[in-house]
Amino acid sequence: MQQRDFTERDIHLSIDGELPLDERAAFERWLERNPEMNAKHARYRKDAETLHAAFAGVLDEEIPSRLLHPAALGGRQVPRQRSAVLWRSLAAALIFAVGGIGGFAASRLTLPKAGSETGAQIADRAIAAHVIYAAEKLHVVEVGADQKDHLVGWLSKRVGLRLVAPDFTSEGYSLVGGRLLPAAHRTAAQFMYQDASGARVSLYVTDDPGRADTGFRFMQEDNARAFYWIDDGYGCAVAGAAPEAKLKALAKLAYRQLLAGETG
Amino acid sequence: MNDKRSAILQEIPRLRRYARALLRDRDAADDLVQDCLERALRRLDNWRVGDSPRRWLFTIMHHLFVDQTRRARRRGEAFPVSHDEAGEVVSEPSQLDALAARDVADALQSIGSDRRAALVLVAVEGLSYAEAADVLGIPAGTLMSRVSRGREELRALLDDTSRRKSIKVVD
C-alpha cells in the first residue's frame, strides 16, 4: 500500500477516532519519526482526556427539579389533568433512569427499560477510554501482556479490587496489556485485547461499592458500543466496535472469570 | 408518544453536560436545558421515530445556544459566568485533577463559541465528525477545522495559564 503523507491534521483525526483503521500503523510510524509531532499528539491527547474528565461529573449530579417540573415538560401545551398523569410517568421513567430516588411512588407505574445512570456512566467512560486508546499503535497500553502478573497485581492494588485479566482466546481475542485510568471518584483498570485482524476490544473495571447489582446492559455510542454491569462492587464494561453479540459473549466471559478470580 | 418523552428524559444528564461545557455556569446551563426541553416537547412531531433523540435534542440546544450568544453580543453583554464555588466544575477526585479540570473549563470559555461547540460535541460528548457536523448544521470539513483550531486554541490558553502560574511562583 502506498503510504500517504501525514500532517498535523491527522493528529486531530487520530485523537477523535476518525483516522481510518488501515492508516493507523503508518501514522504511528510517522509520529515516531517526528518527535515534535509526537509531542504535540501526546499533549492534545492528554487535553482530550482532561476535557472529558472535567465534565464527566455532571452526569452524576442530581437533576434539578425545575427540569422535571410539569411546566418545563409541556404542561402549558396539554390539558392539566393529562399533563399531571404524563408528568408522573415521566418522573417515574427518570427516577428509574437515575437509579431510584426515594419518596416517589413509582412502583405502580410502568417503567421503561433503562440502565441505571451509574452503570451508564461506567459504560460512557469505558467507551471514551476505548476510543482514545484502541486507536493507539505504540502506546495502546502502559504495561504489556508480557508482564501480565505485574500488570494484574499493579492494577488490583491501584483500583482496590482483586482483578484478573480474563482470557478471551476462546472468542479470538488475545491480551495486549492494560493501563490505569482516572474514574469518577477513584481509578479504573483497562485491559486491552485484539483479534487476529488487529480489531480491539477493552474491558474496563472500576470499584463501585454500594451500588445495586445490575444485569448485563447495552449502550450504543457513535464510535463504539459496550456491555456493562455492576456486580458485588465491581463496575465493569466491555467496549469496542465489535458486533453486539460478540461483545456480549466477551462480557459473559469477563463476568465469570472476574467472579472466579475474586473468590479463588 | 410516551416512549418519545421518556427517551427525551433519559437524555437530560447528557444535555446538562453539553450545556455546562458550553456555558460553564450551572444555572445558565440548566436554563438552556430547560429551554431545550420545552422546545423539544412542543415539537415532538418533528422528531421522527428511529432518529437518535440525542442528536435531535443537541440540535435544538445548539440553535438556542446560537440565539443566546447572538442576543448577548447585540446587547454587548458578557455571558453570565458566575464564579461562586457551587457553579464550579468539580467532578474529579484528586486535587491535581480538579485543578486541571478547572483550568481546562476556564480555557474552554475563552475560545470562540463556534469552535467551543464543535470541540465539546466531539471531545466531551464523543460524537463522530459526521454527527457533530449534522448537529451544528455545517459541512464536515468546517467541523473538522473548528475542532482542530479549537483544540489548538485551548492548548495555547492552557500554556498561558501555566506560564502565568510559574511567574507567580517566581514572584
Image: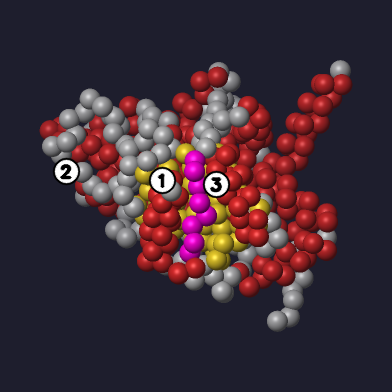
Of labels 3 and 1, earlier in sequence is 3
> Image quarter for residue B35?
top left
What amino acid is found at the position of numbered circle 3 in the picture? Ala
* Position above or below: A102 against A44: above
In the image, B169 versus B8, the foreground residue is B169
SS assignment for the magenta stretch, majority: loop
* Residue B100 can be seen, yes or no: yes
Spatial CA distance of label 2 from label 1 is 38 Å
Callout 2: SS: loop
Spatial CA distance of label 3 from label 1 is 19 Å
Q: Residues within 10 Å of mark 1 (few under 14, many from 20)?
A: few
* Residue B8 can be seen, yes or no: no
> Image quarter for residue A68?
top left
* Position above or below: A196 against B132: below
Q: Chain of mark 3?
A: A
**Coloured how?**
secondary structure
| Total count of labels | 3
What residue is at 38 percent from the left and 58 percent from the top?
A: A252
Q: Residue A217: give x, y in percent of width and height.
A: 34, 52
Looking at this rendering, what residue extends furthest in the front direction?
A: A264
What amino acid is found at the position of numbered circle 2 in the picture? Thr
Q: Residue A108: give x, y in percent of width and height.
A: 13, 37
- Residue A110: give its label: 2
Spatial CA distance of label 3 from label 2 is 37 Å
Same chain assignment for discs 3 and 2: yes
> What is the quadrant of the N terminus of chain A in the image?
bottom right
Which residue in the protein does label 3 denote?
Answer: A189
* Position above or below: B140 against B146: below
Which residue in the protein does label 1 denote?
Answer: A263
